[in-house]
Image: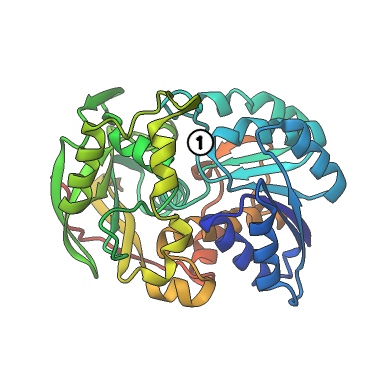
Amino acid sequence: MGRALIIGAGGVASVVVHKCCQNPDVFEEICIASRTLEKCDALKHKLEGGSTKISTAKIDADKSEEVAALIHAFKPDIVINVALPYQDLSIMDACLATGVHYLDTANYEPPDLAKFEYSWQWAYRERFEKAGLIAVLGCGFDPGVTGVFSAHAMKHHFDEIHEIDILDANAGDHGYPFATNFNPEINIREITANGRYWENGQWVETPPLSEKRVYDFPEIGPKDMYLLYHEELESLAQNVKGLKRIRFWMTFSERYLTHLHVLENVGMTSIEPIEIQGIRISPLQFLKAVLPDPASLGPRTKGKTNIGCIYKGMKDGKPKTYYVYNVCVHEECYAEVGSQAISYTTGVPAMIGAMMVLKGLWNKPGVHNVEEFEPDPFMEALNMHGLPWKDTFEPNLVD
């Protein structure tokens, strides 16, 4: 049915490649491209021999002309960007130049500024629409499935949604004193930034990790969770009818936060470059180099994740609450694709989003967040491809 160029060769990319190869009727041919060709070749070696034809390429995704040249050579129907958020715009430029659909899992973030927002990518709306091309933004789990959950809730359960709480819990244990479950640079920049939530038409800012709740998660139990700013808040605040408040919560252990505070206090989380023996490097880049590679955590990680959304609103003139979530088991993810659940819950939705585009089920030219598309086929695909969802109308609400 189609050809996909997958840019990236880390933990999430590995899941995307595995899941594409599980669906050869949709992904007839894939090309894995990264700055490190050896990682691409290792993935190819692990998976070749099935029905999906696999090739590899070395590429610097910071250089739009290199991406465009590879697109011209491989002729994909869609580019799945699971590289770094710093590279979103260069890859989008290449897709525009070559007439190819685009999908990513995280919004653009400038390398020298700890700030992520959709404004840079939303600025491409008119160009993609005029070109008749689709750009799907943030098609991981959060953002991604949380947006699909919201579209599902709007379509099937509410006339108006007034409040959304997005809850992301990882009860997995990898055995290290301190490690991040995805790219350390992105992860630590995200956590150490001010918290922010949307209420009554405006953004409310909070000091980092200052808002805490204990929540009793299904299948996981009570966990400490903290209010963060997360990118899907920006798009959902615009796209959900009648919304009055939206917040994002993530769980952290005391051990994790203690390590993080110490690293902050000694300057290791700074993105400002310093010079050491004639070489300029940011402390956070150095920290990334010494921390365990998230892609290596798979065989060590035990336990479950629970990610979902609680909605409060109105249906047929009556108040209604609704909770929809997914529970993922780290060991089961590793047994299937060789990755822990954090990579799995991001990579599977990226594959499904690309599948929606290739099948013509998502066919709206322009730059769009996932909640702007039809949710039903995606919700069905989650159940079929490893991320089954559960729901209840009597959730334990966040106060």
Position of 41 with respect to 322 (left or right) is right
Q: Is 291 in front, or is 298?
A: 291
How crowded pointer 1 is (Cα within 10 Å; few <14, some 14-19, many 20+) is rated as many
Q: In which quarter of the image is residue 131?
A: top right
Residue 112 place in picture, x, y as percent: 47, 24
State whether residue 92 is above or below residue 200.
below
Q: Is 273 in front, or is 277?
A: 277
Residue plotted at (73% across, 38% down) = 133
Q: The C terminus appears in which quarter of the rendering?
A: top left
Residue plotted at (36% across, 44% down) = 159
Q: Visible in this render: residue 236?
A: no
Q: In which quarter of the image is residue 215?
A: bottom left
Q: Visible in this render: residue 202?
A: yes
Residue 67 place in picture, x, y as percent: 75, 39
State the residue position of label 1. Answer: 107
State whether residue 240 is above or below residue 345.
above
Q: Is 80 in front, or is 43?
A: 43
Residue plotted at (55% across, 50% down) = 374
